[in-house]
Amino acid sequence: MKKIVAVAVMAMCAVSMFAAPKAKKKEIKIGIVNNPPSESGYRAANVKDFESVFNKKKGYKVSTFYSLKNDEQLNAVSQFITDGVDYILISAAATDGWSSVLKQAKDNGIKVFLFDRMINVSEDLYEAAVVSDMPKEGETAVNWLKEQNLPEYKVVHIQGAMGSDAQLGRTGALDAEFAKGTMKKVVQQTATWDEAEAKKIVESVINSGEKFNVIYAENDGMAKGAVAALDEAGITHGVNGEVIIMGFDCNKWALRELLAGNWNYDGQCSPFQAQVIENMIKTGEIPSKKVISEEKGFDAKTIKKADVDKYGLGD
């Protein structure tokens, strides 16, 4: 009897030793193509948002590529396809040129999500887009400007990176006013989201002697650069100033400029898309092909400190 028990115990130990180990949960491979965080306060918040949602602790193996150049972004997507990622998330530097590489991703069974910006491709090449309504941002800003009922509108228009969804959207409504002759285009030039370049543009206009009373800058950083040029030239701005200042993105420091009356308007652009995309990845449910972030514009005359605290990005 003792011999039988001993054999049974040995058999159980053998089964225990050779039992299959518990299967390890498969990491989800994510390739993210984005603009660099140094682009703007908005982009820094956007990058931080994606890092907080898609990371190793949550079971993701993430590769991220940053560039403001469309061709470099396209090459990065091609590399992600070669690497065999499960998903590719894209905030495109420009709207065109994406069809071929996204078709390649689809043929390889890789699911694509767009965020922040739309691109010009067939809807069947991506799962969903979680974006801002850039044309609406421009319309909201220009409608606010028209409501100021200025005797005349002489506008210095500082554009973002040309061909990006943000630039096209924020430019469109203002271009329509220029075309109708309701506003005069003093200068329209890209600073590619850069503060220092925006300052140079405004310095050039000031040195030319041409009069202007509106600066419409397509992000907060460029508005900041424009204001620096005005300050150095002794030109007043903001509420009751000589020049109306308009920016976009709602960085906390920019909204404080509104609160102080130094700027006049700031258009909101939400950088928080990562959680929405993760929910779609986890559930497999796509509520809409295009998910629009809710956004508003802020006026220096009506903004409150609570708005700065609630809607401001960064510190």
Image (spheres, rainbow, N blue to C red):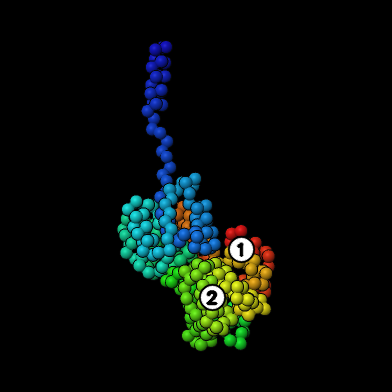
Residue ID at (37%, 52%): 85
Q: Amino acid at mark 2?
A: Glu
Percent across and percent down for residue 74 are 36, 61
> Which residue lies under the disc numbered 1?
252
In the picture provided, is 156 more to the left or to the right than 1? Answer: right
Residue ID at (42%, 39%): 24
Q: Return the residue nearer the eye: 236 or 31.
A: 236
Dot 2: what SS? Answer: helix
Dot 1: what SS? Answer: helix
Q: Amino acid at mark 1?
A: Lys
Percent across and percent down for residue 31 are 41, 54
In the picture provided, is 305 more to the left or to the right than 136? Answer: right
Mark 1, mark 2: which one is toward the viewer? 2
Percent across and percent down for residue 118 are 44, 67
Q: Of the numbered discs in the image, which one, if any, rests on residue 203? A: 2
Is residue 281 among what the camera can see?
A: yes
Residue ID at (63%, 76%): 234
- Mark closest to the chain's N terminus, 1 or 2: 2
Percent across and percent down for residue 213 are 59, 81
